[in-house]
């Protein structure tokens, strides 16, 4: 019996009428119910219990006929713990003050005479919403194990990518980032720059696929005045402008074959010539490249120079698609929601459990970029504080390809279950163990077994 009592949820009832105090305490014996008769005792109880839900009669002493003390108590409660769900209880036909209380931050209101059954439904719903928001806050504050600024990741696959980037960033090695469109190649390139000794210098990015061939060369190398029609003044190119810093060549697989020879010379000799100029300009620069194409296949087809490939791929970093990064979609969703909700002063605070499940199970063909766009749209379109699966507009795809070996299937399933549980409860080991139906020591063993620290 004592074990069950310890698990009761704390509820504070702020009511000065002794008869109603007894009635409500008896009606809500399923909670750890505390009674307060005035503002001071209500605040003291909240300090002691951190009760998620409070019912508050607006008519409190010293002047029960006036609601000013009730409003002052509401403000004191929300100032102490803003997440508290306060249900204000007003007199019959006192709708104006009830609505004012909602404007001041109350969760809901209830008008006398009190029907305990109806009030219980409102209280249970308040506890449920508070619990969801607590989970949401926990998830949004999960310690990102990624050591790179701007990279949100907790999956073993991405943490390994982060470890590689940490090792190569202090060097001048030329890195080639390979991954599907939308996997965050530029974010990782910026992370390489940010962890290098060049971090205080410029990071210059250029997308080789988005600039017409006849303009790409001048964008990269710059040009002298009069080099061609319209060249009214000397213009510095991306390479020269990033001198001392980092040059990021995105979608290098789309670089025209004619420009590839010139790029190879620059990478070998670290000098450039502006278009229309004869002066060789030395450039000290770190180069990071990226593509979503199979460069080996392009080499065989004659679309990419093999010698350039070996020059830009001193180290190759394969970025896994989002569907292969267990748990990362949920973490990224929280990161995007937190950032964009603040920027636009939206009221959205989290996701429903169905929405989180949909985010986790969807295969994300557009990867992180698609996820970010869906979250941004959902924040704008959300009708409530919680984003729903319908607002995300996610259609579930078929299941993943599973290995045949039974041991591999079991280990993969165990690892994903642990990551999923930890993501859902914000890294709380006890709650994760409860979700998985195992003891805490067993969960620690699984975390260590699969390298999920």
Image: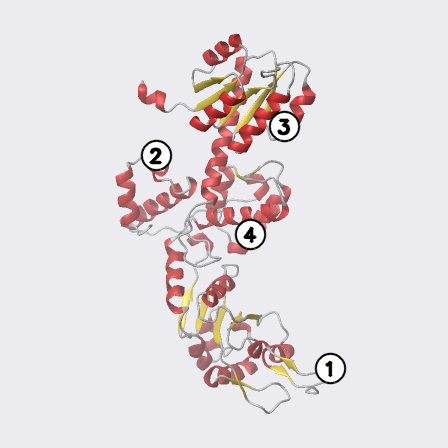
In the depicted structure, whether residue 9 falls above or below residue 285: above
On residue 372, the disc is 4
How packed is label 2: few (under 14 Cα within 10 Å), some, or many (20 or more)?
few
On residue 102, the disc is 3
Q: State the residue in front, 260 or 170.
A: 170
- As helix, strand or loop, the secondary structure at mark 3 comes to helix
Residue 36 image point, x, y percent? 49, 18
Q: Are marks 2 and 4 in contact (CB under 8 Å)?
A: no
Residue 107 visible from this viewpoint: no
Residue 431 image point, x, y percent? 37, 36
Residue 153 image point, x, y percent? 43, 53
Tell me the mark number nearer the camera, choosing from 2 and 3: 3
In the figure, is residue 402 to the left or right of 109? left
Can you say which quadrant of the picture contains the N terminus? top left
How packed is label 3: few (under 14 Cα within 10 Å), some, or many (20 or more)?
some
Q: Residue at x 55, y 28 (%)?
A: 76
- As helix, strand or loop, the secondary structure at mark 1 comes to loop
In the depicted structure, whether residue 77 falls above or below residue 2: below
Q: Where does label 2 land, which residue?
A: 434
Q: Where does label 1 land, which residue?
A: 230
In the figure, is residue 67 to the left or right of 320? right
Query: Reading the chain from its start, which is encountered first: label 2 or label 4?
Result: 4
- As helix, strand or loop, the secondary structure at mark 2 comes to helix
């Amino acid at each position: 019996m004592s074990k069950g009592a310890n698990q009761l949820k704390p509820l504070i009832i702020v009511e000065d009428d002794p008869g109603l105090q007894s009635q409500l305490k008896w009606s809500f014996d399923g909670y750890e119910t505390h009674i307060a008769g005035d503002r001071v005792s209500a605040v003291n109880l909240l300090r002691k219990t951190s009760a998620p839900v409070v019912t508050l009669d607006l008519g409190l002493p010293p002047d029960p006929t006036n609601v000013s003390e009730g409003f002052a108590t509401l403000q004191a409660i929300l100032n102490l713990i803003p997440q508290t769900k306060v249900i204000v209880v007003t007199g019959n036909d006192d709708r104006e003050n009830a609505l004012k209380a909602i404007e001041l931050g109350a969760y809901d209101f209830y008008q006398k005479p009190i029907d305990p059954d109806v009030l219980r439904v409102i209280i249970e719903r308040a506890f449920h919403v508070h619990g969801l928001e607590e989970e949401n806050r926990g998830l949004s504050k999960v310690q990102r194990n990624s050591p790179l600024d701007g990279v949100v990741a907790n999956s073993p696959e991405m943490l390994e990518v982060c470890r590689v980037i940490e090792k190569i960033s202090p060097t001048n090695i030329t890195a080639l980032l390979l991954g599907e469109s939308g996997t965050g190649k530029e974010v990782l390139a910026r992370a390489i720059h940010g962890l290098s000794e060049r971090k205080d210098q410029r990071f210059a990015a250029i997308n080789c696929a988005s600039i017409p061939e006849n303009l790409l060369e001048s964008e990269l190398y710059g040009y002298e005045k009069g080099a061609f029609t319209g060249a009214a003044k000397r213009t510095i190119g991306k390479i020269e402008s990033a001198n001392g810093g980092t040059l990021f060549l995105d979608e290098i697989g789309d670089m025209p074959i004619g420009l590839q020879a010139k790029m190879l010379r620059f990478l070998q000799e670290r000098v450039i010539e502006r278009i229309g100029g004869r002066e060789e300009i030395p450039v000290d620069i770190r180069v990071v490249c990226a593509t979503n194409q199979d460069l080996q296949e392009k080499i065989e087809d004659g679309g990419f120079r093999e010698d350039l490939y070996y020059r830009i791929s001193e180290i190759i970093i394969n970025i896994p698609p989002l569907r292969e990064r267990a748990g990362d979609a949920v973490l990224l969703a929280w990161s995007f929601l937190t950032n964009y909700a603040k920027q636009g002063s939206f009221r959205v605070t989290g996701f429903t459990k169905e929405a989180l499940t949909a985010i986790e199970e969807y295969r994300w063909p557009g990867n992180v970029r698609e996820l970010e766009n869906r979250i941004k749209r959902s924040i704008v379109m959300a009708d409530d504080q919680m984003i729903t699966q319908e607002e995300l507009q996610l259609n579930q795809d078929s299941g993943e390809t599973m290995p045949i070996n039974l041991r591999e299937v079991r280990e993969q399933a165990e690892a994903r279950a642990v990551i999923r549980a930890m993501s859902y409860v914000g890294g709380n080991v006890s709650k994760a163990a409860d979700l998985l139906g195992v003891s805490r020591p067993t969960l620690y063993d699984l975390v260590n077994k699969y390298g999920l620290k």
